[in-house]
Amino acid sequence: MATKTVLILGDGDFSFSASLGAALHSSEEKRHAAVLSSYLGIDPDDSKVRLLCTSFDTIEELYKKYGRPVETNLDILRGYNIPVRHGVDAVRLPEQMQGELFDVIIWNHPHLGVEDAKLHEVLMAHFAHSARRSLHEKGRILLCLVEGQAKRWNLIKSASLNGLHLLTKPRPFPLELFPSFRMVRNKTNQTFKNHQTQRQWVPGGNDAEVESMFSTLEFVDSRALGQHQLFCTERKAQEDLQSNQDGKSSS
């Protein structure tokens, strides 16, 4: 059974890492399979997953910004024996990861703490260059952004210039798979807000409305585009089949 490596970048209070770790160790087969196949793009039948969870801040800075939630989430990760690193810069991955390559690289809500589209365009260009050099040729990069950010930051163009291709159209972030994920700004510990995002998601709330505010963009190395497109076709067929089966069982 192959081992797939997943790198999580810039996880402020580590709530996403803890939620993903819990999902991967869940006894609920349906949730476990959905996280692997639908979100990570990993075959649940022939792959194990090794997570590496990171933050840009030092551990001291994290405790100062986020307080008790950081301690709780790091305890959860320790319970699953999931490694954690601090002070990891998303634009210096080859150097900081010492050449290690990953099958999936995840960065949720990259943000500099200021509303400056040009600065974020530069950030994303440097990230694309860095991430591609730390990605297995058949790997994928998952970015979660607030609606409108990709366009304002010229993300697709920056990625393309650095050898990355947007695999499918942006899709809603699957919040239902990560119920303990708390989306917070890196510097303020306040829930992520802008003109489109006025409240934090709560389980049982209007999921469809809130999901539309957050999108997952999936990028792959342009050299392996054909193989990824075939995988997407197969994944869509599996999801349609599962949806039909769920519909029959509930009727």
Image: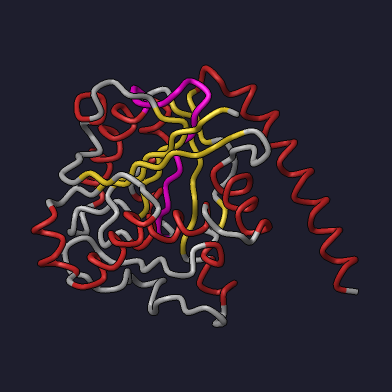
| Colour pattern | secondary structure
Q: Residue at x 44, y 61 (%)?
A: 19
Compared with residue 4, is residue 64 higher up or lower down, i.e. above or below?
Answer: below
Query: Relative to 75, is 62 on the left or the right?
Result: left
Q: Residue at x 31, y 27 (%)?
A: 129
Secondary structure of the magenta portion, mostly?
A: strand
In percent of width and height, residue 145 lies at: 40, 55
Q: Nearer the viewer, residue 46 or 251?
A: 46
Q: Residue at x 48, y 24 (%)?
A: 221
Seen from this angle, which residue lies furthest bottom? 205
Q: Nearer the viewer, residue 45 or 120?
A: 45
Locate the C terminus by quadrant. Answer: bottom right
Locate the N terminus by quadrant. Answer: top right
In percent of width and height, residue 65 lies at: 14, 67
Query: Relative to 12, is 223 on the left or the right?
Result: right
Q: Is residue 136 magenta?
A: yes
Q: Which residues are magenta?
A: 132-146
Q: Nearer the viewer, residue 130 or 39?
A: 39
- Quarter of the figure with residue 228: top right
- Quarter of the figure with residue 131: top left
